[in-house]
Amino acid sequence: MRNVRTSVLALAASLTLLIAGCSSGSEETGGPVTLEFQSLAWQKESVDASKELVKEWNAAHPDIQVRYIQGSWDSVHDQLLTAFEGDEAPDIIHDASDDLADFAYGGYLADLRDYLPQRLKSAIAQPSWETVTFGDGVYGVPFLQEPRVLVANATLLKKSGVRVPTPERPWTWAEFRQVTRRLSGKGAYGVAWPLKEPVSATLNLSLSTGGQMFHRGADGKVTVRFGAADAVVPRTVHDQVNVDGSASGTTLGMGGSDTLPGFFAGKCAMVPLGFSYRQQIVQQAPKGFDWQVLPAPAGADGLAQGVSPQTLSVSEDSPHKKEAAEFIDFLLRPRNMVRLALGDWMLPTGTQALQDPALHTTKYGWATGTALAAHLRSAPAQSVRGYPEWKDKVATPALQEYYSGAIGLGELRHRLVDDGNLVLARYQR
């Protein structure tokens, strides 16, 4: 019996040590607090910048250590949902603002209003904060944003003699359509629209024409409406493909990267892409290929367009919310925010960070993108519950069929509005 008792005591001691070793640290144990930071950075420069900042923090904060965890954009929503439900979520969560609504309303994310310092609150413009505000709470810190731009073959543009747009004097949507007609011919198209995921591009670019699509009533419920302003961008794309022949129908099912080989080969003069695609162009373009960045077309509301910034949130179950917020504040100091932006080829949300000279150079179109920052708005679908289902089951197939010419504008409106409101209604009972 003495041997059994000794074995039991030894086992208990081992378990105690094991639990202490797995602990995140606390006042009770006297050890350092350990925070898990799941990052979705994937480009080498971005990963390097994120890891360097974690290393710098850890060196300066021996009592609050951060462990870097590599996540993936491809699976982040399902991975986080599983982690939340299994009480295994990281303390600090990198995501995008349009993925936060269900997590915020579901109680998985901490309301950060009482944790963020005034420095950080005032450093980021209000339109960016609106992307992470759900109800009365703030459930993330927006830190990187990506406008859509036109990437153009500068040689073809010059040969055509068309007016080259600037942020101060952009093309209108009608002028853009005329330009793409002039740039088409001899087996080449004026524009290649990569619309494998058509909903986000359509909604966000439609803000320039006054389109909104989602409308919240006095009772707080959201309904879909599709008016004249909402139709400008979809009709432009449809007519370029099916009426003018100035846009390739084969690229409608492609992602942005898929269009680059044809762009480099001169098969299309322009491609609407997210700002960060410039890195791929720099890496993949053939030697001597001359390209430039142009602003997206403007409408009744100028250069306005919707964005869903990258965000940093804190898990509601984290026992170290204060420390997590301190790390986020460090990560997003102006100098550090610029480092992250340059690594991801995106724009920082911080007003001081946006003034950094590195973001105002004409090389690789940085200055053009930075000039668009003041026109970026919260994406229309940010706080709409049921949006993922509306997008996947209603809007994506409807827009794909409309852009290909399979259905007309009336049928598109019917599906987006009538079928769409049936979906949203289930989430708002």
Image (spheres, rainbow, N blue to C red):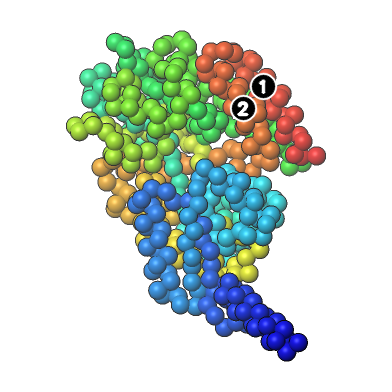
Residue tagged by mark 1?
415
Does 377 appear above or below 176?
Answer: below
**Disc sitting over residue 1 in the figure:** none
Find the residue positioned furthest to the bottom. 2
Residue 61 spot, x, y in % from top left: 45, 75
Residue contact at pointers 1 and 2, CB within 8 angstroms: yes
Residue 102 spot, x, y in % from top left: 66, 47
| Residue displayed at 27% across by 46% down | 361
**Disc sitting over residue 395 in the figure:** 2
Whichever of callouts 1 and 2 sits on the residue coming sooner in the sequence is 2
Judged left or right of residue 424, residue 57 is left
Judged left or right of residue 402, residue 149 is left
Residue 224 spot, x, y in % from top left: 67, 30
Find the residue positioned furthest to the right. 429
Residue 233 visible from this viewpoint: yes
Q: Give 212 or 46, whichever is nearer the viewer.
A: 46
Quadrant the C terminus occupies:
top right
In the figure, residue 319 lies in which quadrant? bottom right
How far apart marks 1 and 2 lie (CA) works out to 8 Å
Mark 1 residue element = helix
| Residue displayed at 42% across by 31% down | 256
**Callout 1 crowding tier (Cα within 10 Å): few <14, some 14–19, many ≥20:** some
Q: Give 163 or 74, whichever is nearer the viewer.
A: 74
Q: Amino acid at mark 2?
A: Ala
Residue 168 visible from this viewpoint: no
Judged left or right of residue 361, residue 401 is right
Q: Amino acid at mark 1?
A: Arg
| Residue displayed at 60% across by 42% down | 382
Quadrant the N terminus occupies:
bottom right
